[in-house]
Amino acid sequence: MAEISRAKPSMQGEVINWTDEMVGALCGEIASGRAISELAGKDGFPSERAIYRKMSADPKFAAIIAQARAAQQEYEADACVKMADEATAADWQVVKLRIWARQWRASKLAPKKYGDRVQLTGADGGAIRTVDEAALAKLEPHELDQLIKLREKLDASEPSGPSGGEGSTGTGGATG
């Protein structure tokens, strides 16, 4: 592992020689499941504060750390399976909590892969339909009737049939 040159701490923080070897070693440790807080200031690594400052100031470095953290989540997924397989009747609740904590962390560090997916859909899983109620209120009763008939015709021609429910035009609360 490369030496990290340090000057005396100043108000700006420690001076660090960010070598490719040191960054590679840091990322290797992160990818193998160790947290930055666990590594910081040990084994020749900079302090936690210095690592996060570097991430904030250097987008390329932040991207390298993000890639290591994504790999870390693969490691953690394997560890979760092992923990679950090794759980006993006496410790399964503790194991469950540990797995949950790792899942939560994975969802924050690698949200595209492990985060909750939120998909907005309309009725019956179809597209979301919006209704401009203010515009509907300005329609004459005969125009609203024509719009309703057109809507019903379009719904009937859809392969999945009428969607109804939220997003359907209905009468919009108007009376004629």
Image (cartoon, grey):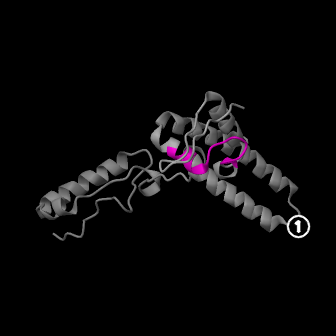
Task: Between residue 165 and residue 9, name the one nearer to us.
Answer: 9
Seen in the image, is 144 located left or right of residue 62?
left
Is residue 47 magenta-colored?
yes
Indicate whether 149 appears above or below 171.
Answer: above
Please name the amino acid that badge 1 sits on: Ala
Residue count near mark 1 (Cα–Cα under 10 Å), binned few <14, some 14–19, many ≥20: few
Which residue lies under the disc numbered 1?
89
Q: Which residues are magenta?
A: 39-53
Residue 51: x, y in percent? 57, 44
Q: Quadrant of the N terminus?
A: top right
Residue 140: x, y in percent? 10, 62
Seen in the image, is 145 located left or right of residue 6?
left
- Which residue appears at 25% of the width and 51% of the height? 150
Residue 89: x, y in percent? 88, 67
Quadrant in which residue 98 is drawn? bottom right
Task: Between residue 23 and residue 86, name the one nearer to us.
Answer: 23
- Which residue appears at 25% of the width and 65% of the height? 171
- Which residue appears at 76% of the width and 45% of the height? 78
Quadrant in which residue 176 is drawn? bottom left
Q: Residue furthest front?
A: 8
- As helix, strand or loop, the secondary structure at mark 1 comes to loop
Task: Between residue 16 and residue 85, name the one nearer to us.
Answer: 16
